[in-house]
Image (cartoon, grey):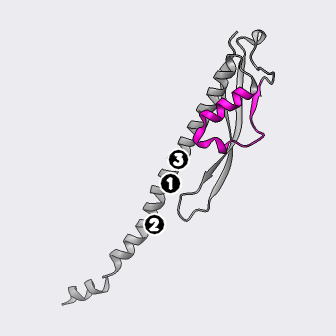
């Protein structure tokens, strides 16, 4: 008879334990998904910067380089902050017959938004993305 009385006193304990663990589990799952999304976004943008540097290495002008970067960053091209796009050296075209073998760096800043993790307010951070290539003569 006593065993039955103890079982009745703990009827809702499993549901409460499940609710507590489920919150932590969902935070971990959404954190993993959000990390994967951010990692993918950064990889696409870094690849776009490398593509811009590659195009610059074959003596393209600045407008063509920026357009190629935006095309390569297609799903995230709106994340490239306006006014932060830079090509070093700053000549137009940056690579010419005199700069063969020198490094060309294409860089820009982007905003990375972290929004999908429950119970954590949305965060935004700015990151510089850059790609490097050698100028061809």
Q: What is the count of numbered marks?
A: 3
Residue at x 35% of width, y 78% of height? 13
* Residue at which label 2 appears: 23
The residue furthest left is: 1
Q: Is residue 81 magenta?
A: yes
Residue 47 placed where, x, y %?
59, 31
Q: Is residue 125 above or below residue 24?
A: above
How far apart are the two marked residues, 3 and 1, measured between alpha carbons? 10 Å
Q: Is residue 132 above or below residue 36?
A: above
Residue at x 74% of width, y 17% of height? 95
Image side of residue 100 versus residue 21, left or right: right
Q: Circle 2 — which element?
A: helix
Q: Circle 3 — which element?
A: helix
Characterize the local packing of mark 1: few (<14), some (14-19) or many (20 or more) Cα atoms within 10 angstroms.
Answer: some
Q: Is residue 56 magenta?
A: no
How far apart are the two marked residues, 2 and 1, measured between alpha carbons? 12 Å
Residue 8 placed where, x, y %?
27, 86
- Mark closer to the chain start, 3 or 1: 1
* Residue at which label 3 appears: 37
- Mark closer to the chain start, 3 or 2: 2
Question: In which quadrant of the rendered view does residue 21 lie?
Answer: bottom left
The magenta-colored residue range is: 63-88
Question: In which quadrant of the rendered view does residue 78 lie?
Answer: top right
Residue 103 placed where, x, y %?
71, 19
Magenta region, mostly helix, strand or loop?
helix
Name the residue nearer the viewer: 120 or 105.
Answer: 105
* Residue at which label 1 appears: 31
In the picture, the quarter occupied by the N terminus is bottom left
Q: Nearer the viewer, mark 3 or mark 2?
A: 3
């Amino acid at each position: 008879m006593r065993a039955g009385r103890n079982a009745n006193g703990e009827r809702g304990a499993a549901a409460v334990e499940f609710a507590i663990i489920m919150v932590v589990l969902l935070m971990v799952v959404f954190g993993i998904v959000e990390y994967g999304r951010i990692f993918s976004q950064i990889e696409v943008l870094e690849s776009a910067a490398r593509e811009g540097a590659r195009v610059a290495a074959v003596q393209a002008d600045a407008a063509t380089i920026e357009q190629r970067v935006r095309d390569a960053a297609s799903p995230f091209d709106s994340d490239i902050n306006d006014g932060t796009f830079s090509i070093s050296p700053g000549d137009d075209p940056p690579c010419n017959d005199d700069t063969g073998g020198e490094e060309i760096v294409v860089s820009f800043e982007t905003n990375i938004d972290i929004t999908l993790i429950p119970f954590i307010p949305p965060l935004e951070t700015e990151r510089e993305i850059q790609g490097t290539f050698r100028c061809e003569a």
